[in-house]
Amino acid sequence: GIAPQLLFSLLLTLIVITSFAVIYQALRTQQRLNHLKNDFISNVTHELKTPVATVSVALEALKDFHALDNPERAKEYVTIAQNELARLSLMTDKILKASAFEMQGISYIAENVNLNSIIEQVLASLKLVFEKNKLNIAYTVTGNNFEFKGSEIHLTNVIYNLLDNALKYGSDHSNIELTLTSSKDYIDFSIRDYGIGI
């Protein structure tokens, strides 16, 4: 009499405990996914704002500073806008790929990149933004070998984000200093502003 009832009670208790464990694990997983989603949205928003702002400044310069009267300057502004729109297209493509492969993770294929070329391209794209904010940019290069295996789109975004942070949080000091150094064993890149720090 008592043994079957006790066995049934133990079995029922075990089922309830297992169910709670499964539900708890599912909630934890959902919470982690929500956290990752929020981080992803925050990062994407940050990355998308920079090219949009740069294109906006280029168009503003075309309209307000009589650039159309100067074909060379107008061409420079249009080129900046074109480069930023191309980067925006690459970024949206990256987001779509991330969504498509989120279960398997994003595939990463290293390519030959030249860090000096990437930095110069970023500085050229942000030229109007720096001018609008009256910022002096000092870029010092030491060495001559800046090639390695990496991702051009990711490195470009990193440099944009670092410069964007220096722009936003660099206080009233008008200088941003970039230094790129190559030696036999390493490549060193730094960005210095005079803001509050991290």
Image (tube, rainbow, N blue to C red):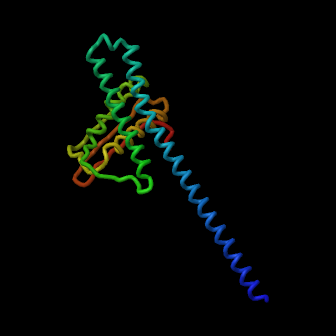
Residue 89 horizontal/vertical position (percent): 36, 35
Residue 105 horizontal/vertical position (percent): 41, 55
Q: Residue at the location (46% across, 41% down)?
A: 44
Q: Residue at the location (44% across, 56% down)?
A: 103
Q: Outermost residue toward the right? A: 1
The answer to whether one can see residue 137 in this image is: no
Q: Would you say 93 lies left or right of 146 here?
A: right
Above or below, 18 against 181 in this view is below
In this view, the residue in front, 20 or 5, is: 5
In this view, the residue in front, 67 or 101, is: 101
Q: Would you say 192 lies left or right of 71 here?
A: right
Q: Which of the 4 image quadrants contains residue 48?
A: top left
Number of marks drawn: 0
In this view, the residue in front, 178 or 164, is: 164
Residue 46 horizontal/vertical position (percent): 47, 38
Q: Residue at the location (66% across, 67% down)?
A: 20
Q: Would you say 94 lies left or right of 37 here?
A: left
Q: Outermost residue toward the left? A: 144
Q: Which of the 4 image quadrants contains residue 154?
A: top left
The answer to whether one can see residue 27 in this image is: yes
Residue 183 horizontal/vertical position (percent): 24, 50
